[in-house]
Image (tube, helix red, strand yellow):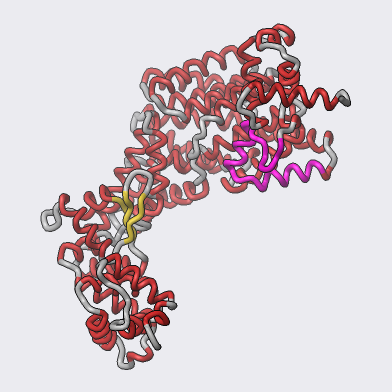
Amino acid sequence: MADAAEVRAFDGVRLLVARAMAASPSFDLDQSNFREVAAVCSRLEGWPLAIELAASQLRSLTPAQLLETLDDRLALRSKDPATIARHTSLRAVIGWSWELCEPAARTLWQRASPFADGFDLDAARHVCSDERLPSEEIWRVLDSLVSNSILVATRGPSSLRFRFLETVRQFGREQLDLSAERLHYDRRHRDYFRSMTADAARAWDTAEQTASIRKIRAEKANITRALGWSLATPGEEEAGLEIAAHLRYHWAIDGSIRDGRRWLERALDATTSDAGMRPTALWVLAWVTILQGDAGACSAALDEARELALARDDRIASTRAQVLRATASLWVGDAQDAVTSLRSALEFFRGAGDAGALLFTSMMLILALAEAGSAEEADSVATEALSVSGRSGELWGRAQSLWALGYCRWLAGDLDAAHTLVESSLNLRLDFDQTGTALKLETLVWVAASRREYERAATLLGGVQQLWKRLGTSISAFGIHFARHAHECEEALRLTMSAAKFDSRVAAGRALHVEELIDYALGKALANGAPDERNLTPRENEVSRLVGEGFSTVEIAERLTLSVRTVEGHLTHALAKLGFRSRTQLALWAAKRSAANRGM
């Protein structure tokens, strides 16, 4: 190679130079060192990880010294350095990096190897520190590992996150094995994430609800590893059962129904009836299986849960099982039996002060009362639930109560109220509430069809069908009432639209990302759409027309025999759907549309 400029054209060389300059700003590629730099990259066969690890050593070595040291290292790994396999080359460089690390960095490297898909400073301090590696030293050692390219640091929403590339992690794991401390640090890793899942379960009915379940999401790989390790390690199985039970809301609500069932069944199979969390795990399994529409598995889990709860005089566990048994009754059509049982459970949870259980029971009771035709009592239950939710600061129970009450209003034929309630529920934007989001969108399909917004209903239908598929269940799993509504709605849409139009709208809905689908359900026009009255409901069109004719809100309310607040709601929805920011924009648009319709 002729000069440094020619060498710099290679990707591996550019990477090494960039990383070397980051480690030592005075470094540069020039005519005095380009041959050695090129030779280093050649020895490492262009592997980015190996190059990064080697480049970090250019803080203290010249390129010639680096090449000499590297050649010595690789020669130990093979009798024929010219034909060294890539894997051997990489492991040689990783081993060399290990030898160059200070003792504290080696210790942290091996102790952090149980982490899957990264960790933060708090996790490192809890899992890896002791008298040999004090907690206050962890940050300095992490920084040194990042500086030497052993760890990669990325900024998360609230803190830095550290991650090994897999080959580097595996090397640390091997060193942990050699230290005879593997079991100790695997258990510490498991205990840290077991504690996290327990905290998330406790925080469910508090203002920390959203933050706690998002943390579970972020640490899903570590939690899954801790769960799997517990169930595969003799003597640790009950801890695995605890983790599986603590993840109840993640399994049932956050789009992990299939995973939840698999882990719960495995954990229950691995433990005995003496396990302390067994009744809770059985209740969670019943919840997951009923969401899949598997009534047999749900009933079997509830039978065992009730038997264990009664034997232990555990009223909380037995009443939770009672709620799910009532849910099963409702879903096979016995609304009155469900109402009676759910009323009893709600009374118990009021006395127990269990806000989370009270809110879940309230949701189910509202749905049962809706089917039983007791709308007035449903209003009362919803009012109490919303009050409890407001005091606790949680959001999921609030969203579910609004949705259930909206469903009740739809059954009663109050379409505007149904639309407003379900839309308010969806507008809380609980990204972890994937099951609930699907139910809300499904209900909005029925409301839209009842309001003769057929194209809108078909678009929403396509989107929600795709969402159910991703969740591993369907609306039919939620009982005969919901299954019938869904079937009748789809049949009505097919009868009122041409096959081509129906298929087109359903396909458009299926193509939407879930956030786009929610935006559309909340009134936002589909991408690239100009303001279009077809996005508006008949009432919103009527209100918009009157705005264009110069009527005030009070005058529109009097003219349409509506409350001022209802008119303001229709105006808000019309503005959002058409993409306008002011009433003036809406008035001008409506006036132009009226003129065009009159042929002016």
Task: Report the number of numbered marks.
Answer: 0
Give residue 553's quadrant in the image. Answer: top right
User: Nearest the camera: 307 or 487?
Assistant: 487
Residue 88 picture quarter: bottom left
The image shows residue 532, relative to residue 61, as above or below, that is above
Prevailing SS of the magenta stretch? helix
Q: Quadrant of the N terminus?
A: bottom left
Farthest bottom residue in view:
80
| Extreme residue in the right direction | 599
Residue 512 shown in magenta:
yes
Q: Residue furthest left?
A: 131
Q: Is residue 133 magenta?
A: no
Residue 528 is situated, as x and y percent measured from the top left of the image, at 68, 43
Dividing the picture into quadrants, the one containing residue 50 is bottom left
Q: Quadrant of the C terminus?
A: top right
**Residue at 76% across, 36% down:** 455
x%, y% of residue 4?
Answer: 37, 81
From the viewer's perspective, is 576 left or right of 83? right
Residue 347 position in % (x across, y down): 44, 17
Position of residue 179 in the picture relative to residue 499 (left or right) = left
Using the image, determine if residue 553 lies above or below residue 346.
Answer: above
Taking the spot 55% from the left edge, 39% from the top edge, the residue there is 291
Between 597 and 139, which is closer to the camera in this rendering?
Answer: 597
- Look at the image and tell me whether residue 115 can be seen: yes
Residue placed at 56% from the left, 36% from the top?
437
Out of 261 and 117, give the one closest to the viewer. Answer: 117
Q: Is residue 271 visible?
A: no
Q: Position of residue 25 (x, y in %)?
A: 26, 66
Q: What is the magenta range? A: 501-530
Residue at image coords 67%, 31%? 578
